[in-house]
């Protein structure tokens, strides 16, 4: 990774948490079925970003590139230390209770289902049985799914015994935006305190971002490292987003300030 130097134009507030970022290392075995590949982005690289933008706590998300092999995630959590860092792992229904206990000790407080991209290591059918196993541990379920997938499984989100976190604002598409049926599903869960929307990579979902934030919407960091040209400044702390509909550029409020009131997953993972 190439890091820029100097202070960021905007510093994060005290005790701010970057609620979603990845670490990549070529030493870790890649899941042959995954479709996401990324150059190395190490703990040392990420610490440069922290120093620049002023965050002090973070949540590391297991990248889909490594499937259900969380060896790298455990290593990373050990490097950061559990005083400031938690993790979200990827597991399937074959995971043992001993393995879940080991992940918990390492600092994991949730599991993620990446169903928006082909070649994922998990499926919708795994969500309910796994949710029942992680709920006693105080973990949450995190979903990266299309808006249609979220809406089609509305009953599932109400039935599982742990909080649901929806990545990327539920991938609400344009021109529907807040009129998409998934928006009503997510906001209903938010109002009931059973779910959370993560305001990552909004790009062209500005209407959804503003609407969801009226309920209970987390604002994580820039999903470092970025691998899409539609973002600029992800390594600088100066994140700007381009709306392809209007060709206007706007600054993104991207860091969650958890100094007074933590939102899930911040409050959940650091409790």
Image (cartoon, grey):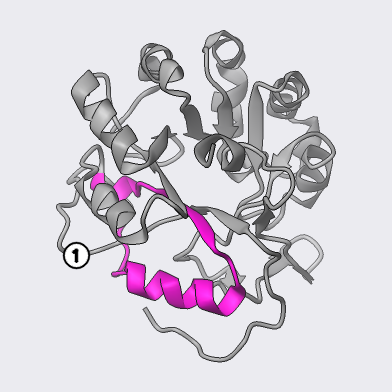
Q: Tell me the magenta residue range.
A: 37-66
Asked if residue 235 shows in the view, the reply is no
Q: Is residue 42 left or right of residue 209?
A: left
Q: Position of residue 11 (x, y in %)?
A: 69, 74
User: Looking at the image, which residue sits at the far front?
Assistant: 83
Q: Residue at x 36, y 24 (%)?
A: 123
Q: Position of residue 174 (x, y in %)?
A: 72, 44
Q: Nearer the viewer, residue 103 or 163?
A: 103
Q: Is residue 101 left or right of residue 224?
A: left
Q: Residue at x 33, y 46 (%)?
A: 64
Q: Say if the magenta span includes residue 196.
A: no
> Relative to 108, is 27 above or below?
below
Q: Nearer the viewer, residue 62 or 265?
A: 265
> Relative to 47, is 197 above or below?
above
Total marks in image: 1
Q: Residue at x 61, y 53 (%)?
A: 220
């Amino acid at each position: 990774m190439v890091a820029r130097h100097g202070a960021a134009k905007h510093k994060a507030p005290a005790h701010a948490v970057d609620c979603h970022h990845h670490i990549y290392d070529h030493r870790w075995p890649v899941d042959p079925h995954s479709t996401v590949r990324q150059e190395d982005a190490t703990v040392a690289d990420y610490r440069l970003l922290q120093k620049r933008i002023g965050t002090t706590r973070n949540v590391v998300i297991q990248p889909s590139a490594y499937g259900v092999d969380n060896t790298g995630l455990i290593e990373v959590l050990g490097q950061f230390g559990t005083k400031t860092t938690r993790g979200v792992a990827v597991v399937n229904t074959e995971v043992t209770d001993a393995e879940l206990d080991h992940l918990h000790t390492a600092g994991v407080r949730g599991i993620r289902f990446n169903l928006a991209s082909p070649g994922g290591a998990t499926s919708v059918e795994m969500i309910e049985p796994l949710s029942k196993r992680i709920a006693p541990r105080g973990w949450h379920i995190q979903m990266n799914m299309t808006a249609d997938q979220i809406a089609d499984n509305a009953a599932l989100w109400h039935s599982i015994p742990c909080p649901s976190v929806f990545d990327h604002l539920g991938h609400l598409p344009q021109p529907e935006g807040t009129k998409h049926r998934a928006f009503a599903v997510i906001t209903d869960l938010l109002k009931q305190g059973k779910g959370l929307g993560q305001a990552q990579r909004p790009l062209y979902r500005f209407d959804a971002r503003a609407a969801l934030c009226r309920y209970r919407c987390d604002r994580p960091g820039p999903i470092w490292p970025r691998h899409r040209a539609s973002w600029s400044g992800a390594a600088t702390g100066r994140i700007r987003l381009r709306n392809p509909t209007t060709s206007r550029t706007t600054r993104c409020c991207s860091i969650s300030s958890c100094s007074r009131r933590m939102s899930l997953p911040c409050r959940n993972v650091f409790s």
